[in-house]
Image (cartoon, helix red, strand yellow):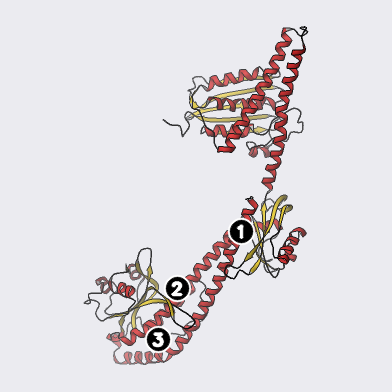
């Protein structure tokens, strides 16, 4: 499958998931709004109860002020009816709700315990009424123990008149929380069908109220009222948390779309821009989100892109453009750049309904792919020339020698011819070896090494001596540190590295000069450096000098040759030994290539 098609498929899936998250968020916001309306209706039925509470509090203050608890408060105003859209709003709503519950039940303390399915525990959830932060932190028990566990497991409410004596109660509860009696109900979520029948019931925790005020005891009426209040509290908690999860999912999806390297524009069926990520904005020269909601014909300037969107929306089918060159401004440098893009449209449909939501326009930057294809084409042309040149030379001199049947050429001339043929054969052999190595790297991703002790000093002397025989204008010199230890490596491949670097130094020093090969010790290994005084490498070319098929842009192509794989192989051969390679260069002053090899490759067997 082409890379562009895979990107479009991925973007289509992400866009559909994002749209689904938006739909779920809207549904949950509607559910929370309906729930708030239900709470307001419930409060209307509780106003009479509030009046009774005020009357009882007035009586308690005049008749027995010593029983008035410091935590008691007057009746509070109705709950805010605005939808819950954040964690602080949820906490504030629960705080008002739990205060209302404590007042209605005349309880001195009230707390929610929510269930943690990972630890199978019930834990206190803030806010609470009449409990300190320290008491909340310690209020965590297994979901099968004590009063809390019994109510959670059975779903049945429970009243305990004396927590210190009741066997079902946890002793620490009476001691740590300093409570006498309690009423506990489950926090249950119910789903109902159109006829109001319960289709699903799930318990998410329990609700405790402690210590009936003025020395009283909780009764059946309290349990019934507490059960009504708990169902509404459970619905508020469950739906609000679900809403936050959906909002978080939507935000994550939006962040994923925003961070896509591919540009993405989502246009609705009404022709207005619904979404545009940063990559698309950079390509189209747009910043921020001011363009969201505007017609795409006003936002997008490129006529070809607009035509693709028009066709996709009109014909209700996907459209693709094989390659389109666009000019955009780099956000970092502010400079204009031309880049090649594969542009495709993808139809986005609703997950449930299947109705068309809009059209996603995907900008896939294929500049590097196009550049690589051009480099491959140039490589094939160059390699054909590189193979043909030595063969032509060899054929010419062999033909000349064969036609000399009368001994026209003397022995010295013949020896010169033989030396040229030998040099061209060496050049051809080296090129074929490089191609074989490149093929192995491309097919397997790595190079197999035949490890054995290698005398680097002797190997360098041999390579320098061999190359010296092929040059007349250059002086080749080896500077070897005395007493260098042998290293464990593949001698043939290290020789290939040396030959590539030395031959490059010769090729890119067309005017002659000295080529110096130095070998020195380096921490736990050996450093080899090849220095020339040739044309040098421009600074902007250095980061790419070891890339596959990369060739220097020399104006005088007649003086140098190469197919762009030598330094690529040098890097891979050195790294296969666990080493590293570097380059320093200055135009018209020469270059210094260095590589370091460890005494023993890291993955070599003992």
- Any mark on residue 74, and which? 3
Is residue 522 placed above or below 123 in the rendered structure? above
- Comparing marks 3 and 2, which lies closer to the viewer? 2
Mark 3, mark 1: which one is toward the viewer?
A: 1
Vertical arrangement, residue 56 with respect to residue 262, above or below: below
N-terminal-most mark, 2 or 1: 1
Look at the image and tell me whether residue 273 can be seen. Answer: yes
Mark drawn on residue 238: 2
**Distance of mark 2 from mark 1, alpha carbons?**
32 Å
* Local secondary structure at mark 1: helix
Q: CA distance from mark 3 to mark 1?
A: 56 Å
Q: Quadrant of residue 101?
A: bottom left
| SS at badge 2 | helix
Q: Which mark is residue 11?
A: 1
Q: Which residue does the image show at 65% across and 22% down from the upper left?
A: 426
Q: Nearer the viewer, residue 394 or 550?
A: 394
Label 3 vs 1, first from the N-terminus = 1
In the rendered image, residue 367, in percent from the top left (x then y), is placed at 69, 48
Quadrant showing the C terminus: top left
């Amino acid at each position: 499958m082409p890379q562009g098609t895979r990107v479009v498929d991925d973007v289509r899936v992400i866009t559909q998931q994002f749209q689904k998250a938006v739909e779920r968020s809207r549904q949950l916001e509607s559910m929370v709004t309906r729930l708030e309306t239900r709470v307001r209706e419930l409060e209307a039925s509780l106003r009479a109860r509030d009046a009774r509470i005020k009357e009882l509090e007035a009586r308690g203050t005049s008749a027995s002020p010593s029983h008035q608890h410091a935590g008691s408060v007057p009746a509070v105003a109705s709950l805010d009816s605005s939808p819950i859209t954040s964690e602080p709003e949820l906490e504030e709503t629960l705080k008002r709700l739990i205060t209302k519950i404590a007042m209605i039940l005349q309880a001195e303390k009230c707390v929610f315990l929510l269930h943690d399915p990972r630890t199978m525990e019930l834990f206190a959830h803030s806010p609470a009424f009449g409990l300190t932060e320290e008491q909340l932190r310690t209020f965590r028990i297994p979901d099968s123990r004590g009063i809390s566990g019994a109510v959670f497991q059975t779903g049945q409410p429970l009243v305990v008149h004396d927590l210190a004596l009741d066997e079902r109660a946890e002793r620490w509860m009476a001691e740590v929380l300093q409570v006498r009696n309690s009423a506990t109900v489950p926090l249950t979520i119910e789903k109902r069908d159109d006829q109001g029948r319960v289709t699903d019931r799930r318990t998410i925790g329990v609700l405790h109220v402690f210590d009936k005020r003025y020395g009283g005891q909780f009764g059946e009426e309290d349990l019934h009222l507490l059960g009504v209040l708990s169902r509404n509290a459970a619905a508020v908690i469950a739906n609000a948390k679900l809403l936050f999860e959906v909002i978080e999912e939507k935000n994550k999806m939006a962040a994923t779309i925003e961070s896509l390297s591919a540009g993405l524009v989502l246009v609705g069926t009404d022709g207005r821009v619904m979404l545009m990520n940063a990559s698309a904005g950079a390509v189209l020269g747009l910043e921020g989100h001011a363009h969201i909601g505007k017609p795409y014909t006003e936002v997008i300037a490129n006529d070809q892109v607009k035509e693709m969107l028009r066709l996709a929306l009109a014909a209700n089918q996907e459209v693709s453009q094989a390659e389109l060159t666009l000019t955009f401004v780099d956000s970092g440098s502010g400079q204009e750049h031309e880049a090649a893009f594969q542009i495709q449209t993808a139809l986005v449909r609703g997950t449930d309904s299947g109705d068309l939501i809009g059209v996603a326009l995907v900008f896939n930057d294929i500049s590097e792919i196009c550049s690589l294809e051009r480099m491959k084409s140039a490589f094939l042309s160059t390699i054909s020339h590189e193979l043909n040149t030595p063969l032509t030379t060899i054929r010419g001199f062999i033909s000349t020698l064969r036609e000399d049947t009368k001994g026209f050429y003397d022995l010295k001339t013949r020896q010169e011819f033989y030396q040229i043929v030998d040099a061209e054969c060496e050049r051809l052999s080296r090129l074929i070896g490089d191609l074989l190595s490149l093929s192995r790297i491309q097919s397997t991703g790595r190079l197999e090494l035949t490890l054995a002790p290698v005398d680097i000093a002797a190997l360098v002397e041999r390579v320098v001596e061999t190359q010296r025989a092929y040059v007349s204008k250059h002086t080749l010199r080896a500077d070897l540190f005395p007493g260098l230890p042998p290293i464990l490596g593949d001698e043939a491949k290290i020789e290939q590295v040396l030959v590539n670097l030395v031959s490059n130094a010769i090729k890119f020093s067309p005017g002659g000069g000295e080529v110096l090969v130095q070998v020195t010790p380096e921490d736990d290994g050996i450093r080899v450096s090849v220095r020339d005084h040739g044309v040098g490498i421009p600074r902007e070319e250095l980061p790419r000098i070891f890339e596959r098929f990369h060739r220097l842009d020399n104006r005088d192509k007649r003086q140098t040759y190469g197919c762009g794989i030598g330094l690529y192989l040098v890097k891979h051969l050195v790294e296969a030994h666990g080493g590293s390679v570097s380059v320093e260069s200055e135009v018209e002053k020469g270059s210094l290539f260095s590589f370091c090899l460890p005494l023993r490759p890291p993955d070599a067997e003992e």
